[in-house]
Image (cartoon, rainbow, N blue to C red):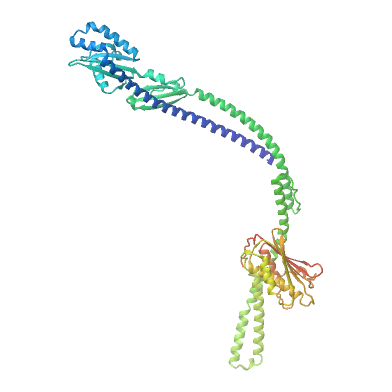
Amino acid sequence: MTLRARLLISTLLLSLVTTLGLALVVRDAWRGAEATEFQHRFEDAVAGLEKFLGATARDLSLRLAPICDHDPVIDSALVGLQARDLGPRLLSVRARIDSLRSSLSLSELVLLSSDGSVLGGSFGGGAYSSAELVELALKTLKRPGFVQSPERTFVAACKKTDSTEWVALVASRHLDPLLAAASSPDFRLTVSDAGGYPSEEPEHASGALVQTVQAEFLDGAFIQAVRSRVPLAASLRYLDLRVFSAALLALFGAVVLSLFLSRGLSRPVVLFALKTRAALSGKVEALPVTGGPELEEAARAFNATLDDLRALRQRLKVTERIAARREVARQIAHEIKNPLSPIRTSIETLRKLKSRGHPEFDHYFNETTQTVLEEVKRISNLASNFAEYARLPSPQPQELDLAALTRKMVALHQDLGATVTLSAVPLPLVSADPEQISQVVTNLIKNAIEATAMLPTPIIELHIGPHLDGVTLTVSDNGPGVDVQTLPLLFEPYSTTKEGGSGLGLPISQRIAIEHGGELSYRDREGGGAEFTLHLPTSGPPSFDDDG
């Protein structure tokens, strides 16, 4: 699948998933907010109902007390009860009780006598006996209360007493009308007995918000609030329609945007792939710097990588040669050191024979031993030089001021008969091993001094300046330079034109430069002479696996 197709599909999927995810979050938040609002409304309704019903019970008691104390009809009934002539008075008593019930907005009102007789009004629809009515009246005299049956009712009472007789007014207000007044078309409150939760009606089961709580102020009865889900369902349908419309618009915009972006992005990427395959096959071509800022930056980075690849291939060749030479050096050092022990043993044996006075060894003993010892020294020196080249330690980098280090090296060589000049510009610090870099700089300066030793006016110039990602040190002289035959072997171990030279100075210097991530190169100096250039990156040596 092409990048353009993947970008198109990814954009569509991202738009679709984002829109659907947002819709689900909004729906869930809406549902949660609706449930939370219903819960708060129910809690507020229960708290308000508790306050209202408590006030209702107290209000009943407060309204009855003045009637018992001052109403003449109540007084007349009590007098008739004492005189045993209630008959003529009952008609007026009953009319007064009915009038009081209506004026006080009571559900029920009854006037009882001390013997349990109902003098006026009614209570409970005949559900209470005379004794139960008297008990209820005496109970609610002290504290108005709630009665579960026959109807859920708030009851209060007052009593007027004479020496031997008393009459009592018992009033009630039914709970259901009060609940109806506290309800609304979309929020209905109901109460069940304390025996269990209210039974669910079909409306509850078919889709309604239901909340139930047990009310202590109703003697343990359960208050249930019911709210229809129809408005919520309608709101969610409206939300779904709007989300669906937004999703269609988002998908359409995503298609247009992805087509536009894919056309601009796919072309540079395809071209990048073609250039990469060409570079891998050996045909290195620069990538055009076009497109947006990111693509232009990528093109520049790709072109810089191509330049590094060219340099890396050259360094790789040198590194492979160094690795091969290192292995040869180890083997030669091993082979040279092997005969040292028997040579030394032979010398010791000759000396023992001489010490015994053997006549056949007196003539040539000293000459032979001296020759052997000289060979041993020569072979040992040769092995040490090889071992130094093979076991060059890995760089131990630290921040280094190349200009300051070079000035010290120049100062050490000013008294050797040549004038050495140094020019430098402000440079960043490099990460390098000071001892190994000192060894390279010293070797280059000494080679220049030796190359110009026979000239009447030797010229040795050092220059330090920036170069790409690092710094360079150039050491040039006006000596004879390097001839064409020696040039291919310039950095080969033991390749030297100097008498007594080891031929390891430049190979070791080149190896140090490469292990620091840089390089040491040579070219002929303009006007005659030699010019060596040491390049060091500021980032320091790469990781080398050197077994020593």
Q: Position of residue 165 (x, y in %)?
A: 19, 15
Quadrant in the picture for the N terminus: top right
Q: Residue at x 45, y 27 (%)?
A: 38
Q: Position of residue 194 (x, y in %)?
A: 33, 24
Residue 442 showing in the rendered view: no
Depth order, front residue of 309/138: 138
Instruction: Tell me: residue 38, above or below residue 281.
Output: above
Instruction: Tell me: residue 45, above or below residue 324.
Output: above
Q: Position of residue 214 (x, y in %)?
A: 36, 27
Depth order, front residue of 169/234: 169
The reply, left or right, for residue 178 in relation to residue 467 is: left
Quadrant for residue 415, please give it: bottom right
Residue 543 showing in the rendered view: yes
Quadrant in the picture for the C terminus: bottom right
Q: Residue at x 49, y 28 (%)?
A: 34
Quadrant for residue 349, please give it: bottom right
